[in-house]
Amino acid sequence: EDQVTQSPEALRLQEGESSSLNCSYTVSGLRGLFWYRQDPGKGPEFLFTLYSAGEEKEKERLKATLTKKESFLHITAPKPEDSATYLCAVYDNFNKFYFGSGTKLNVKP
Amino acid sequence: DVKVTQSSRYLVKRTGEKVFLECVQDMDHENMFWYRQDPGLGLRLIYFSYDVKMKEKGDIPEGYSVSREKKERFSLILESASTNQTSMYLCASSPLPGTSGGAGQYFGPGTRLTVT
């Protein structure tokens, strides 16, 4: 059973076209939800940590939100340099991390 | 800034060789992890360690072992490399969870290992 599911698998946007990436989870006892950005051939880069439903975090054109069952990564007016794979991970009460398979974002100029 | 470094960015080894991948973190984190990442399979946990000389198997430990003699260093060992171990290997570290919840993992740049 998948603990973390990300959708869509791939997303193509025009520059300036805002959208959202979804991360849904089924772990019991969420202790933290994390968003990462990964560029080809590199390690994931840490973006945000969210701990409880209703929490929001922002960084430049990115905004992460959390509910009891899912998290969204909103991208406002994206630029080509935002193209990357975005990974979501959760940490549960049993001290285990679960990663989603990622959303590959391509922003065209 | 947290820094996690890995000994090599690219590595080519022959089948049957013993391979050592080294990882060092400079933030005094208790937890360290080794993953492999393959297209279509995502990140898969090989081993992790929550303290010096402690280790726990992850989801795919077969064919691998680890060593953690010092807090800042976590080594992944391929006892006898095989072609199906060709992959991107990622090391990560994280602090112990605080009272507010879990702490995220910080990743190194990765080692692209090719076994021929």
Image: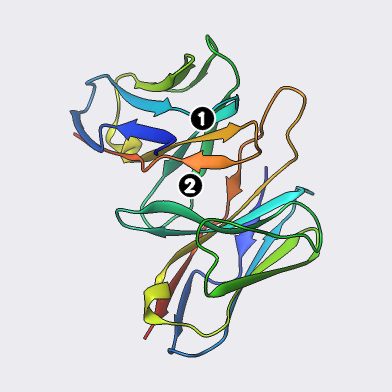
| B96 shown above or below B46 | above
Mark 2 vs mark 1, CA separation in Å: 22 Å
**CA neighbours of label 2 inside 10 A, class few (<14), some (14 to 19), many (20+):** many
In the rendered image, which quarter contains the C terminus of chain B?
A: bottom left
| Nearest-to-viewer mark from 2 and 1 | 1
Q: Residue furthest front?
A: A1
Residue B17 falls left or right of residue B56: left
Q: Are marks 2 and 1 on the same chain?
A: yes
| B22 shown above or below B90 | below
Q: Amino acid at mark 2?
A: Pro
- Identified at 50% across, 41% down, the residue is A98
Q: How many marks?
A: 2
- Identified at 66% across, 39% down, the residue is A95
- Identified at 39% across, 21% down, the residue is A72
- Whichever of labels 2 and 1 marks the residue nearer the N terminus, that label is 1
Residue B109 falls left or right of residue B76: left
* Chain identifier of the residue bearing label 1 in the image: A
| B81 shown above or below A16 | below
Q: In this figure, which residue is indicated by the disc labeled 2?
A: A44
Task: Tell me where residue A82 appears, x and y as whole percent.
Answer: 34, 35
Q: Quadrant of residue A48?
A: top right
Under circle 1, the secondary element is loop
| A104 shown above or below B72 | above
Q: In this figure, which residue is indicated by the disc labeled 1?
A: A27
